[in-house]
Image: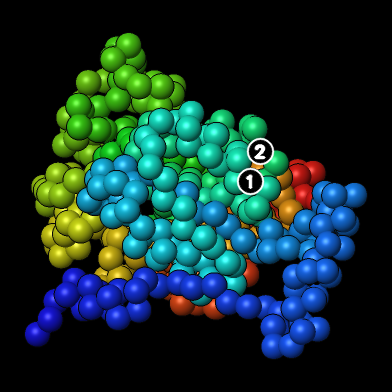
Amino acid sequence: MATIYEKALEAHSKWCGKISTELKMPLETRDDLSLAYTPGVAEPCRAIHKNPDDVYKYTWKSNTIAVVSDGTAVLGLGDIGPAAGLPVMEGKCVLFKRFAGLDAVPLCIDTKDPEEIIKFCKQIAPTFGGINLEDISAPRCVEIERRLIKELNIPVFHDDQHGTAIVVTAAITNALKVVGKKPSECTLVVSGTGAAGSSIIRMLHKFGIGKIYGFNINGIVIKEDYDKYDFLTKELTEITNPDNQRLTLAEAMKGADIFVGVSAPNLVSEEMVKSMARDPIVFAMANPEPEITYEKAKAAGARVIGTGRSDYPNQINNILAFPGLFRGALDCRASKITEEMKIAAAKGLASLISDSELNADNIIPSAFDPRVATTVAKAVADEARKAGLAKE
């Protein structure tokens, strides 16, 4: 029997990729041609030149996202380059279309220079309603995103950072209801402080988690090592490890309420889970192999378990966030995506699990729940309007 990888390779070969363009206007007659192209096309050009905002009325800009990557952090494959990363970027475009009705274009670029990536994104901005940065390695991805948010007037979002953080925050919201704990009472341990981990820490800090410890390949994030860190990790020293303790991962997990892993396989043992506080919450999301398997976490007494996989309950999947997030941002023509809009997205996502449906194996909706994108979009658009960032 063919493996999933063999089947995927055959499918990609059969279709020569996953996306194509399509015509919205008819093009069957001379009259059709005169409307779609010359001479008729001159009139929308004149209208946009007179009023630049009309580009949203007369072109695809109002419904189209650029998916930009340099191929330096593709899935668990690492720095495989822009050409090898293209299947993933096509896949991202498929998800935008399927789950939010947004058109998206993959743009894999042959440079690792942050300044060149920023310049490229600024140069293509007139064509697109938003830019989704994808699979760009940390900490460059953070620098690039922050600069573009400041320098562009369209939404810019790095999904590897914030998409995971939004879904984790939504899942934690409901997991804490299951175990009957308040965020301020909880201690959180996060393994992995790269793009996703750093954003998870920042968002859950804003969410109100009482105490947070962050770990990376060099051990615990601690103020004593401030001068050794890149700018991203330096920022985390301000909101993690408040007592400045040099703990091991096992020591930090003793008495902790929540573990979130976005790092490497097999870092967490059953004994470590058993040492956690009452009704521990364990989100082990490293792919393809997690920090601890679902079975071992369950056997060790984890009350709520989240994974990055579709074959177990509570899949923490970015699909639940980014399509609706961009849908809402484009629908109201938001000029940027803020932390408050991301929190609103998380709250909207969490709200889809009613109290009667909520249990340890059902804290987050399915990616195929048709309410997801519309609910997230509305929450994001409402927050943008509230903040005065929406043009419509």
Number of disc labels: 2
Q: Where is residue 166 shown, x and y percent of the image?
A: 49, 52
Q: Which residue is mark 1?
A: 125
Instruction: Find disc 2 in the rendering and name its residue.
Output: 152
Q: Residues within 10 Å of mark 1 (few under 14, many from 20)?
A: some
Report the amino acid beneath label 2: Leu
- Determine the residue positioned at 60% across, 46% down: 124
Under mark 1, the amino acid is Ala
Tag nearer the camera, 2 or 1:
1
Q: Residue at x 70, y 61 (%)?
A: 62
Q: Position of residue 361 (x, y in %)?
A: 34, 70
Name the image quarter holding residue 217. Answer: top left
Badge 2: how crowded within 10 Å, few (<14), some, or many (20+)?
A: some
Q: Nearer the viewer, residue 10 or 178?
A: 10
The residue closer to the viewer here, 176 or 74, is 74
Residue at 52% across, 60% down: 105
Quick one: label 2 or label 1, which is nearer the N terminus?
1
Work out how far the residue at label 2 is from the one at label 1, CA to CA, in angstroms: 8 Å
Q: Residue furthest bottom?
A: 28
Label pair 2/1, CB-CB below 8 angstroms = yes
Q: Residue at 78% across / 56% down in the picture?
A: 55
Is label 1 in a helix, a strand or a loop? helix
